[in-house]
Image (spheres, grey):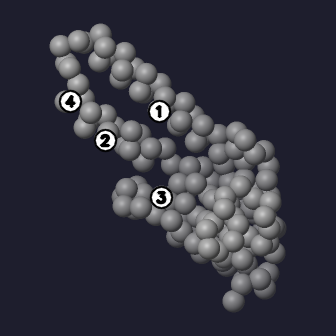
Amino acid sequence: MILRPVVTKTLIKALIPLLIILPLLNLSRLTSLLIFTSIYWMMIAVYVLFKRTHSYEITSDYIEFKGLMNRGMRVKYWDIEDVFVSQGPLARLFNCGSVIIVTSSRNWQVVVIGRGYGVRLWDVREPWSVQRLIISRLREMGYHQ
């Protein structure tokens, strides 16, 4: 199963502050307003493209994380200590969220405060189903109670 981050939520999160800021700007200077919004949306486009470079593959033996900075990092199931979901109100609305995988190894990219070290499947669709899938694979292999 290959998963990719949801970018729809990102675009909505970018639109909300813009809608709040625009009425506060001096609308008499149309050129400045156009330059500001153009730069703003270019920055959002770069962020969305960066987010789209991430993918996660869940196999029967490991979970592979691919992204711009980390190519092909694999977490074997025996390294996984816990799996939980982080989902804010907007993520719930778009049925996405981050699946945090706590590992026994310090070799991974995300530090989970108070619980150990781990990695994150960033803004995936149906995160609770992904969590259940990973936990069921852990149980099949005898690594999770």
Contact? badges 4 and 3 (CB < 8 Å)? no
Residue underneath mark 1: 44
Q: Is residue 55 left or right of residue 142?
A: left
> Could you tell me which residue is drawn at 37 percent across and 15 percent down?
35
User: Does residue 8 appear in this view?
Assistant: no
Q: Quadrant of residue 141?
A: bottom right
Q: Nearer the viewer, mark 2 or mark 4?
A: 4
Q: Residues within 10 Å of mark 4 (few under 14, many from 20)?
A: few
Say left or right for 39 vs 135: left
Q: Residue furthest front?
A: 114
Q: What numbered label is drawn on residue 60?
A: none
Instruction: Give the mark, 2 or 3, whose residue is nearer the N terminus.
Output: 2
Q: CA distance from mark 2 to mark 1?
A: 13 Å
Return the residue at label 2. Answer: 16
Q: Is residue 4 left or right of residue 38?
A: right
Amino acid at circle 3:
Cys
Q: Give amino acid for label 2.
A: Ile
Q: Which label's residue is closer to the chain start, 4 or 3?
A: 4
User: SS of the residue at dot 4?
Assistant: helix
Q: Amino acid at mark 1?
A: Ile
Q: Residue at x 42, y 57 (%)?
A: 91
Percent position of residue 119, x then y? 68, 60
Quick one: label 2 or label 4, which is nearer the N terminus?
2
Sequence-wise, the earlier of marks 2 and 1 is 2
Q: Which residue is mark 4?
A: 24
What amino acid is at disc 4?
Answer: Leu
As drawn, 94 above or below 30: below
